[in-house]
Image (cartoon, grey):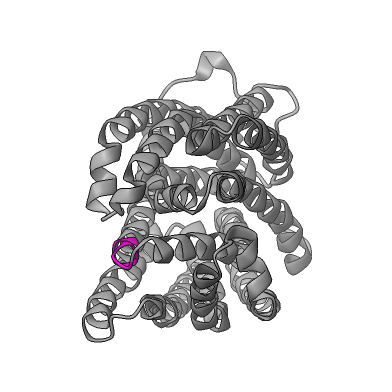
Amino acid sequence: MTKGSILPQVLLFALPLLGSSLVQQLYNTADLLFVSNFAGKTAAAAVGSSGLIFTCLIGLFTGISVGVGIVIAHAWGAGKYKDAEETAHTALVIGVIGSILLTIIGIAAARQILIWLNTPKEILSEAVRYVRIYFLSMISMVLYNMGASILRATGNSKIPFYILIGGGIANVIADTLLVAVFRMGVVGAAAATSISQTVSALCMLTFLLSSRSTLRLTWGKMRIYRHWLKHILFYGLPAGVQAIVLTFSNVIVQYYINGYGENAVAAYAAYFKIENIIYYPVMACGQAIMTFAGQNYGAGELKRIKKGTWQVMGCSVVLTMGIAVFMLCLSGFFMSLFLRDSTVVSYGISIMRITFPFYGLYAVLEVAGGALRGMGYARMSMLVVLTNLCILRIFLLFIINKFVGSFSSVAVVYPITWGVTAVCFLIAFSTVMKKKMTETSRLK
């Protein structure tokens, strides 16, 4: 990614990332679709109310995988392939250890966490069953994501996509059998996801150990290299904290949503699934620019980073707003895919009308933030997210809930905090680029 035309190259790299995200989302979306159609509204609410728990608890390892990607991208761009290899081996080992601990904690604390989230009593038991079974897939989920970060950092985004297609197909087949045929409800949905995640993880591990991998791993080198562990944690911990903090703010949102009852929970659960159709293209652009910036930073190509970031950002905004307008025009259709109750459908549509017109702001913050993280400014990114998408968002939630107190008003916090965060990231990116380019010109 250090040579050639920028925008076509980054977009071609981003397409498999987008495909991977959409297929991965198929796991939970398939669960919700099958459960809502074959097990009812209460079961659908139970599945939807637990989604943020997984995101929050695996946030640290998601961040560490970002750190892995940054370290490998820097080494790859600089042509230091042995360093990239040692980093990859370290990443898989710490992924296995950490995910085992996460599984134990998640299963033991599932009920209490759901109670803290103010989960309605009528769906609590079902939600606990779903969460505990789902946590059995944590090891597979972390292994796949670590492996995907390793490959993407070297410029290979296709293999993770192909692997996820296989996992997605396995998930739909398992959902059909366990939920639609055997009528196992939320238990069957959680088991289907665990099966499909395990298939994806095994395929990823097999590829990384094969001769076809651009960065080949071997069992004999599977250990923690302390030097590279420090580098991974230096970049990964801020990204992990950022992921946890962002999800924590969404957990607070979920808390307020749960306070409005079962209809509100079901509506927001469906909304978040639909929102991902816009979110994942934006996220793919952010991931692509992070790899692009990381490799070019390692190669010392600062002007290329600046040019590429602005090009990808503009493209991402246009794409995002196009999808948002299309989905708003068909909002009733999309909501009815997940919900049968007309009242709940109207709730979901009202949320879409508040947030979707402003989603271009999220595209700006995701691309600018991705470029900063790729260059190694993970702590700066963390501070921007902590300040705006957590502290400011929670403050606004408190104020709006106290003085307005309506179901749809909760969604207002999203476009406000997106806008403030986008401005902060733009200022940060411009400042960093100016500083780095000045330093480079002085050295010349």
Q: Residue at x 64, y 79 (%)?
A: 328
Q: Residue at x 47, y 47 (%)?
A: 43
Residue farthest along the bottom direction in this orientation: 403
Is residue 209 within the magenta segment?
Answer: no
Residue 286 in sight in this render: no
Q: Residue at x 58, y 39 (%)?
A: 150
Query: Measured from the top left, where is residue 217 in percent x and y?
Result: 60, 24
Q: Residue at x 47, y 74 (%)?
A: 429
Q: Nearer the viewer, residue 244 or 126?
A: 126
Q: Nearer the viewer, residue 288 or 292?
A: 288
Find residue 318 and report its image quarter. Answer: bottom right
Q: Which residues are magenta?
A: 254-260
Find residue 34 and report its image quarter. Answer: top right
Residue 185 in sight in this render: yes
Query: Measured from the top left, where is residue 440 in percent x and y?
Result: 50, 69
Q: Is residue 88 above or below residue 267?
A: above
Q: Is residue 177 left or right of residue 426?
A: right
Q: Quadrant of the N terminus?
A: bottom right
Q: Nearer the viewer, residue 276 or 269?
A: 269
Prevalent SS, magenta region: helix
Q: Nearer the viewer, residue 114 or 399?
A: 114
Q: Quadrant of the C terminus?
A: bottom right
Query: Measured from the top left, where is residue 360 in percent x and y?
Result: 57, 79
